[in-house]
Amino acid sequence: MENHHPPRGPCRDQLPQRSTVRRTFKGFGRALGRAHTAGGRSPTAGAAGRGGAVRAERPHGGRGRPRTSPHRPRPVPVPVPVPACGLGAMSGPWGAAGPALRGPRAGWLWAAAAALALGALLGAWRWAAGRRRRRPARLQRVGTVSSLFVYPVKSCRGVAVPRAQVTPMGLQSGELRDRFWLVTKEDGHMVTARQEPRLVLVSVGCENGCLALSAPGMEPLRLPVRLPRKNPVRNCRLFGLDIQGRDCGDEVARWITTFLNSEPYRLVHFEPSMVPRKSKDVIDLFRTTDEVAYPDCSPVLIISEASLDDLNTRLEKKVKIQNFRPNIFVTGCNAFEEDTWEEILIGSVEMKGTVCCARCILTTVNPDTGVLDRKEPLETLKSYRLCDPSERHIYKSSPLFGRYFAVDKTGTIQVGDPVYKMVQ
């Protein structure tokens, strides 16, 4: 794998070094010491600084009044020099306060100033050191993006795209956003290929601001992406959680119901003004900031080509990547290496690995025929891809295939982009 230094931010050599900060502290301390001495700690300078005459030294023993000669002229007060780094060199009220800080209380005032300056320098050093620790030491190339997929309607056929925007709520290509449309029952409960396997045969596209639907034996149908405000907003239910969607109308509802030859179904669209679902409410390992519309729990799913190849070596009948519906398909890494990626960089997009994808019966739906097998590849995955016993409370008895990612930094990615693991 190739190692690359991150392209952004200061490198380690540009950050404050400990020895540099130590020398700065020492130099600052010496400057304060000189300023403290010049600030009137000697009796002579202190008296002159207060505008008084210079008194003669007391006799040995310190008793009696000081003796002065009546014929000796009173010395002229000598101005006390103000250090350039002291408060007297400042403008405004602090500059005016400079002479006051050269009196008897100068000691503790200068000590307080030194403590404040020391604290500021120490804070700056700790901030820089923490910034250095949080940045990855290097980028390790682990693969290449070979395919990108957006699934506008949940459980319907995905759209392969050459590039996509990665938003906090998933991939977007033009006006097609990942799993922003949902088929529901009339009571609002979601319908997926788990219940209606033939949904995987519905192709989705976008033409001139319209969502285009097509399916075997059906006339193509178009409906506007931006729905009329008169269309009602419906309350929906996904995995026990409530979410809203604007009804797409009676025409598309009849179209879907006719194709599936089923009970009446509706199609709803999630709008940006609506409240998304919290991923953490589905799986506690997500962060409170991770949100989705109609995906199961995560905005991005990544699978490697090597993982698919490894599975196919164990199957009598090979399966396609469409069985597993990832958003990003990666080549050039080892099988199941994606399980270990904690933080990755693709283009300018930064993503954080959360949990592996626990697989269900939907993987047994043939994406070309819409027929539910109920056995493979799920049974084979269960033979060697079960979780560690310590993680059974998360995944239960489901096998793992692919890894979910949350989006830390948005941007655009495209096929051919290198995938980097961000190494601390």
Image (cartoon, helix red, strand yellow):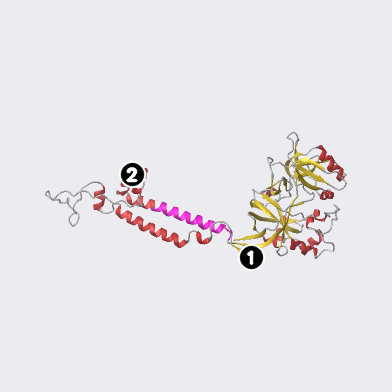
Q: How many badges with numbers are in the image?
A: 2
For residue 196, above or below residue 235: below
Q: Residue at x 40, y 53 (%)?
A: 115
- Amino acid type indicated by mark 2: Ala
Name the mark nearer the viewer: 1 or 2.
1
Q: Secondary structure at mark 1?
A: loop
Residue to which mark 2 is pinned = 96
Residue 54 disc label: none
Query: In screen coordinates, is 123 left or right of 284?
Result: left
Q: Residue at x 80, y 58 (%)?
A: 320
Residue 2 picture location, percent across and down = 63, 65
Specify the principal SS of the magenta part. Answer: helix
- Can residue 360 be found in the magenta stretch? no
198 and 348: which is toward the camera: 348
The first of marks 1 and 2 along the sequence is 1
In the figure, residue 376 lies in which quadrant? bottom right
Crowding near the residue tagged with mark 2, few <14, some 14–19, many ≥20 C-alpha atoms within 10 Å:
some
Residue 32 picture location, percent across and down = 35, 55
Residue 378 picture location, percent across and down = 81, 58
Q: Secondary structure at mark 2?
A: helix
Q: Does residue 325 appear anywhere in the picture?
A: yes
- Amino acid type indicated by mark 1: Glu
Residue to which mark 1 is pinned = 2
Q: Does residue 285 appear anywhere in the picture?
A: no
What is the span of residues highlighted in magenta in the rendered image? Answer: 114-136
